[in-house]
DNA sequence: CTCTGAATCTCGTGT
DNA sequence: ACACGAGGTTCAGAG
């Protein structure tokens, strides 16, 4: 990884056109050739960047202290960086990274709830996870004690898209005479107001779950915290 | 901005739990207090981060060369960084950034097409941009030579969500007796196959536009390229 | 302020 | 390779 802090001016042309006036910024060049240009604020997203794979051509006019970098990728994206007044230029080999270990996203919610569908409604038992339809799998398919099917969509946050998605599944599932009148249920940690209204309009039940509560349902094992 | 290259081990707990085994990485601390931890590959997204506003507490056991950083934000997110073997530690004041100037996204497409609706279909003329409905504005409302209304949704990429969005608008617009039978049209630079099928099913016309062609429709002015 | 939708999104997964 | 969905998304704009 190469880190350069310098005064620079940047032009990007590709999926959009963008320009950065002259200012001091950090230029990060990763070992895969990707380049990103950071300012000293905002979140982690750089002001400009070029993702790997890409090629870097550096031109240095004889005698001048200014460099021009031309970074191109396979497509028609071009990043031009004019660099002057370099105040840091370091290259360090970081080696390979062992990678990030994650835990606690939608897949985990689905895993827990598939073992405890009655946590959602007392009369439910699991038919199967990832129940297939022609346009994709329903997260959970359950059945009530008196034999009605309930299609369940699990989201971290319940938004309008989730309701639409479940609606499409329901439309297909209800064409299957073996299933009969399939109910719909949207499960999420929070449900946005617009999604709630749309769900109500389509007779889809919304259930709010608490992630910490659900973790309590799991068999105790090696948890990080 | 402070740049540290060091061997570190990281734990994040918050909306999910994540762990980074010990390895050499870049730790970037911006002047707003935000922290991000980068490896030497992948795109610009860091392996772990904490967005501003947040607080950093640094503990250094007496005599040891290891530091522990605890970074917390207002919520319950916590980032713990154990740092050893520092190979770079630099702080540079970058000053404020004049900011990014963009050009060429969906808004620009809409702007050009609102001036040239006949580019989409020869019989169209503009009624108004951002035509209001109860659930949000339609990008363009046009009218055919023989007086029928056409609601147009403009996207950079036509995906299933865009069709759903336009469908909701159409459902509302068609309740208005003053408008009569409103047609739907999805305009995009590319239309994904699933979106195309759904659009066809709902009698929504798809139109592919080429951004470079459209720029040619604009009055020539100061273009970057 | 919150909420909504776009993004040069990035990143995983499955076909 | 491409398509699709999720994200600790981030970001800008509107209400």
Image (cartoon, coloured by chain):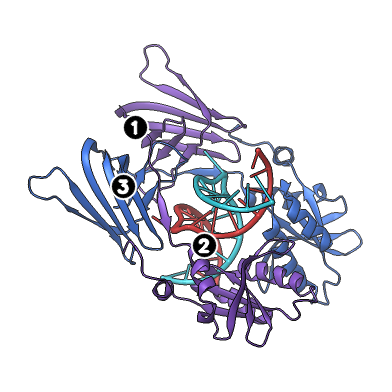
Chain colours: A blue, B purple, C red, D cyan
Q: Residue at x 76, y 80 (%)?
A: B180
Q: Position of residue A153 (x, y in %)?
A: 72, 58
Label 2, residues with CA under 10 Å away: few <14, some 14-19, many ≥20: some
Q: Chain of mark 2?
A: B
Label 1, residues with CA under 10 Å away: few <14, some 14-19, many ≥20: some
Front disc: 1 or 2: 2
For residue B2, above or below residue A181: above
Q: Secondary structure at mark 2?
A: helix
Quadrant in which the C terminus of chain B appears: bottom left
Q: Nearer the viewer, residue A23 or A154?
A: A23
For residue A26, above or below residue A163: above
Tell me if C5 is positioned left or right of A122 in this view. Answer: left
Q: Nearer the viewer, residue A181 or A126?
A: A181
Q: Residue furthest right?
A: A146
Is residue A126 at least partly visible in the picture? no
Tell me if C9 is positioned left or right of A9 in this view. Answer: right
Q: Which residue is mark 1?
A: B3
For residue B104, above or below residue B82: below
Q: Residue furthest left?
A: A63
Q: Position of residue A218 (x, y in %)?
A: 71, 41
Q: Which residue is mark 2?
A: B107
Q: Pick whichever of labels 1 and 2 is earlier in the sequence.
A: 1
Is residue B185 at least partly visible in the picture? yes
Tell me if D2 is positioned left or right of B97 in this view. Answer: right
- Give the Cα separation between the discs numbered 1 and 2: 37 Å
Q: Position of residue D8 (x, y in %)?
A: 57, 44
Q: Secondary structure at mark 3?
A: loop
Q: Chain of mark 3?
A: A
Q: Residue at x 59, y 36 (%)?
A: B14
Q: Which residue is mark 3?
A: A30
Front disc: 2 or 3: 2
């Amino acid at each position: 990884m190469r880190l350069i802090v310098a005064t620079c001016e940047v032009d990007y042309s590709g999926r959009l056109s963008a320009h950065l006036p002259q200012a001091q910024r950090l230029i990060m060049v990763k070992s895969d050739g990707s380049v990103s240009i950071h300012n000293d604020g905002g979140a982690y997203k750089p002001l400009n960047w070029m993702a790997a794979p890409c090629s870097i051509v550096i031109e240095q006019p004889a005698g001048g202290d200014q460099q021009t970098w031309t970074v191109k990728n396979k497509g028609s994206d071009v990043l031009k960086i004019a660099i002057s007044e370099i105040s840091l230029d370091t290259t360090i080999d970081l080696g390979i990274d062992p990678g990030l270990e994650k835990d606690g996203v939608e897949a985990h919610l689905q895993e827990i709830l598939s073992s405890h569908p009655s946590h959602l409604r007392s009369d439910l038992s699991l038919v199967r996870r990832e129940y297939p339809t022609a346009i994709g799998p329903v997260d959970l398919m359950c059945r009530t004690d008196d034999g009605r099917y309930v299609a369940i969509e699990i989201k971290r946050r319940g938004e309008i898209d989730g309701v639409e998605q479940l609606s499409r599944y329901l439309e297909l599932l209800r064409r299957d005479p073996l299933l009969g009148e399939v109910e719909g249920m949207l499960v999420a940690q929070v449900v946005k107001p617009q999604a709630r209204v749309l769900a109500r309009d389509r007779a889809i039940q919304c259930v709010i779950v608490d992630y910490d509560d659900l973790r309590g349902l799991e068999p105790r094992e090696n948890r990080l915290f």
